[in-house]
Amino acid sequence: MTKKELLRGIPKIDEVMRQDPLVVLSEEKGSLLVTEAVREVIADLRASILALEDGGAESFDPAALGLAAVADAAAKRLLLDEELNLYPVINATGTILHTNLGRAPLCKGAVENVAKVSAGYSDLEYNVPKGKRGSRHDLVGDLIAELTGAEDAMVVNNNAAATMIVLASMGAGKEIVVSRGELVEIGGAFRIPDIMMQSGAYLQEVGTSNKTKASDYENAIVTKKDLADPSFNAGDPRHGMRFETGALMKVHKSNYDIVGFTEEATLEELVEIGKKHDLPVIFDMGNGLMLDMSAYGLSEPNIPASLATGIDVMLFSGDKLLGGPQAGIIVGKKKYIKAMKKHPLARAMRVDKMTFAALEATLMKYRDPEMALRDIPVLNMISASEDEMKEKAGRLVNAISRIAPEIKTEIVPVLDQIGGGSAPMVRLPGWAVAVWDGTKSADRTERKLRKAEIPVIARINDDKLLLCVRTIAEDELEAVAEALK
Ligand SMILES: *Cc1c(COP(=O)(O)O)cnc(C)c1O
């Protein structure tokens, strides 16, 4: 066939649209998108025919111009166009709070509540019993107070936002005293000194990298009286300009540890100094651990215990060890929280009904710690016993030998991690299934797993491809085996 004949052979759009599969698709999705897909397929065909070398027309298969073939190509294009960029994956890395994989998976109750609350209208800012305007800030305040012992609470977008509004509200134009050993960088440009600068507060570093004593905080306090004294800091330009102290702040060393010759001030010591000098104490806790999990190797501070030391304001993430949606939760004394709710930044940082729906349902679980450990995926994964995981690994091996029998497997012990910049030194003994296929390298199998319908993200250790079962849900085992096929 010549180029001209091929071009003449291209079908008309309405002819293609009358093909059965496209008639069905048009009913389902409306004809606009289907027509557009057909138009694109036809334009591509025309372009590739025009691009043929003179005399090269023989290389073009005229079957591609058949009505059924064009309709089929259009249907495929339509489905590809509909693929979303945000989709589920299976986490086989054994890292529980995997930052790249969305940190905490939500509990079932939270997911159901999000669907229930966000599909229609809700009482987000309406007090139904009173029949008048309400506040979204009241939605979880009482529950958080019940669980933590805090006087009041406020929810913002994430803990970075919480840090920002706490500092802006309590420290703008004032000095906030922080230990040199606690000037953390969390990642993604979140650094305490930078956030401090943005908030309008002045960072007053005290102590050294490895040792900060309680007295270091106390010695750094600047009062109004100091500032009124002309001899204060006079003649020593190294002190620079000083401002009145606004608060003492402790930041949890979330993603690193300092070992060796070390010392840090405890929350109790800071509370005592705060009381003596009438200064609030702030604790950026980060991880949001609500329960004592030391039985599971996690010796991190928890929220109620930290608050019980008498600190004034504390902040943490909703989607680290709390196991809920992305959020920053600020708890503490009413007078400080009240001022934050009225701060101009509050509106810019407020969260949506979907977040409240997920958060309230997650927090409800904590009314019974046993229920929290069972139902909140993050806690469930941390507390999973080695025997349980070894059995799960066995079930994965069975699924693989049934679905992808050519794959060789071995059950091996592994050390899993909390992740998400939390508890960096903790290693949780777990179990994994090592998989290999004689002819393929671990890298190739790893790539294959990522290309599966539900991508599986695995761990490579010593050239071995590991599927760590701690982070694989029971109902995902089959899909992992499918991905290996
Ligand atoms: C994680 C963390 C943050 C930032 O929280 P996001 O929820 O990621 O915004 C701030 N401070 C500390 C101590 C943290 O651990």
Image (cartoon, rainbow, N blue to C red):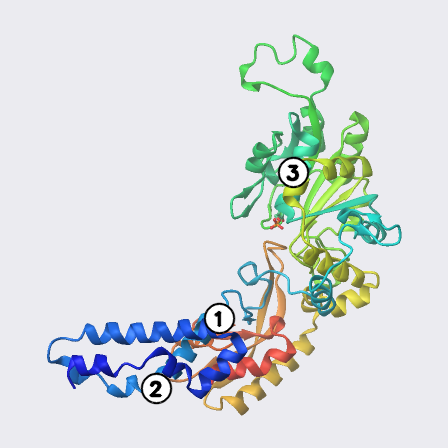
Secondary element type, mark 1 = loop
Closer to the camera in the image, 223 or 133: 133
Q: Which residue is drawn at the image coordinates 88% and 54% (left, top)?
A: 129
Labelled pair 2, 3 in contact (Cβ < 8 Å): no
* Residue 213 horizontal/vertical position (percent): 68, 33
Q: Estimate the spatial distance between the alpha carbons at disc 2 and disc 3, rounded to whole Å.
A: 59 Å
Q: Earlier in the sequence, mark 2 or mark 3?
A: 2
| Quadrant of image for the N terminus | bottom left
The verdict on label 3 being within 8 Å of ligand 1 is: no
* Residue 58 horizontal/vertical position (percent): 16, 85
Pointer 3 residue: 345
Among the 4 quarters of the image, the one containing residue 4? bottom left
Examine the rendered structure and indicate whether residue 133 appears above or below residue 468: above
Q: Earlier in the sequence, mark 3 or mark 1?
A: 1
Examine the rendered structure and indicate whether residue 271 appears above or below residue 240: below
How dense is the environment of label 2, judged by Cα within 10 Å: few (below 14), some, or many (20 and up)?
Answer: some
Decide if residue 343 is on the left or right side of residue 409: right
Q: Nearer the viewer, mark 2 or mark 1?
A: 2
Among the 4 quarters of the image, the one containing residue 107? bottom right
Q: Earlier in the sequence, mark 2 or mark 1?
A: 2
The verdict on label 1 being within 8 Å of ligand 1 is: no
Examine the rendered structure and indicate whether residue 44 appears above or below residue 103: below
Pointer 1 residue: 83
Pointer 2 residue: 67
